Amino acid sequence: MKTDRVKPKLVLESLMGDPVLSHWIGPEGIAAGTALGRISTYLFQQKPVSKIESARSYKSKSDYSVKKEVNHVVIPVEVEYNPRDVESNPVESPSISSKNDTNETNNCNINEENELDSGRYSVFATYSDEPVYSVFINENALVCLIGTSYLMIYDTVNYKVLSQCSLHLTSSTIKGFKQVIQDGKLVLVSSIKGIVLINLTNGEIHLLNNKSIINNNILSFQFPYISTTSFNYEEKHEKLIGVYKIHLKGANLYNRDTHFNTIYDDNGLEMINELILKEKRIHLITLCKLWSSYIVVVCDLLTILLYNREDNCLHKRKTVKYDILSINSEFEDYFIMLDKNSSLNLVNSNLDILHTFNLYPSTFEIGWSYNVVSYKNLISFNSDEGIYYMKLPENLTHT
């Protein structure tokens, strides 16, 4: 095992009492949303795009319609300039601000060539009506899911609001929603009435019947797969893990009020794996991710179980010293494990730690929900201090 001391770059600072709920990284940069509705980004330097090109490229990929506001429900509107709309280098705006960042060459000491790209820090909203459950950047448009009510869409080039889109998800659809989980451009909202799948780029909304998992806790959403956990109510000590595949093949209905395409998939979930954990000493399933041909399960924060997806048999087992906070399974040769000791570990199929990166000065003591996201060899994670990002060495990256 090789250990490297890394100084990851802090790009978005956290505010005390305002945990990060949504976190995304892609070719455009890093975006985050918080419990109190703060929306901020760290945009990588790219070629400038004109205002007209930005709007045209976004609309060509969207099914949103331009309508007037009716009965206090905001349907996509072309927003006029107001205090929230600012120039490309705002100074006094309370809602959107930006700041250039000059990157030093020694931000990460993995090797001399591992320099981090510089970018621009921007705050698009200091607060929102509800928590920000998902963020996604698509062709210079920052799309944010505010609560389960509406989407806010910002122009990341000209730093202004493009539109606000109501989802019109009625109380009967998502009343008492339990979880909101994002996977790229797709957002899953789980409730006692069903599962709502929202596509942030084209406005499609899928309604899935979730009778088979209504009492389950969703551990992960990796489209088209959902991993869940539940108790066996006949054998109380048994824990069940189910992996379901989503089939989107329902009837397409156009909603005149929302201008979204709503698709009903009554039989949209198919179970493909079921794991039964019979050990009495296992109290809680804390994480589950699909990786390569395996299912990675974390029990009680400290025990890793690796199952074969083909036959549901246990492949490897390992207990670690520090709490496992997050798993990233986007890489082919290893999965990434973030632990409470401020370490990022690359783990292979034998559960051997190939490489460890010490992430000082980041800490993970408050107990918020921590997450590791990746794009190619760029890794971003949230800690008590805020959101960091770093680069993996090219010779370690196989996605």
Image (tube, helix red, strand yellow):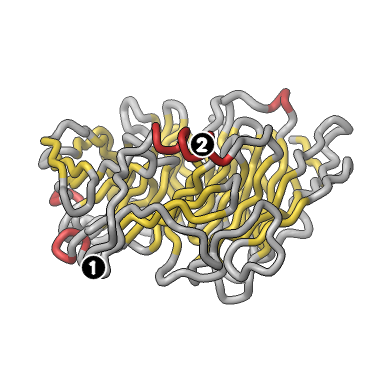
Within-10-Å neighbours for mark 1: few <14, some 14–19, many 20+ = few
Quarter of the N terminus within the rendering: top right
Identify the residue at image location x=77%, y=36%.
2
Q: Label 2 is placed on what type of residue?
A: Glu
Q: Secondary structure at mark 2?
A: loop
Question: Looking at the picture, how far across and down is residue 185, in whole percent?
Answer: 41, 41
Whether residue 66 sits left or right of residue 326 in the image: it is: left
Identify the residue at image location x=76%, y=49%.
8
In-front residue for pair 348/55? 55
Q: What residue would you read off at disc 1? A: 176
Whether residue 245 sits left or right of residue 23 in the image: it is: left
Identify the residue at image location x=55%, y=67%.
83
Quarter of the C terminus within the rendering: top right
Q: Secondary structure at mark 1?
A: loop
In-front residue for pair 331/298? 331
Q: Label 1 is placed on what type of residue?
A: Gly
Q: Is residue 314 visible?
A: no
Question: Looking at the picture, how far across and down is residue 209, in whole percent?
Answer: 14, 47
In the figure, 303 relative to 283: above or below?
above
Identify the residue at image location x=14%, y=63%.
172
Within-10-Å neighbours for mark 2: few <14, some 14–19, many 20+ = some
Q: What residue would you read off at disc 2? A: 139
Front disc: 1 or 2: 2
Question: Looking at the picture, how far across and down is residue 388, in whole percent?
Answer: 68, 52
In-front residue for pair 112/156? 156
Residue 280: which numbered mark, if any? none
Res 251 quadrant in image? top left
If you read the primary sequence from the N terminus, does the residue marked by circle 1 or circle 2 appear first?
2
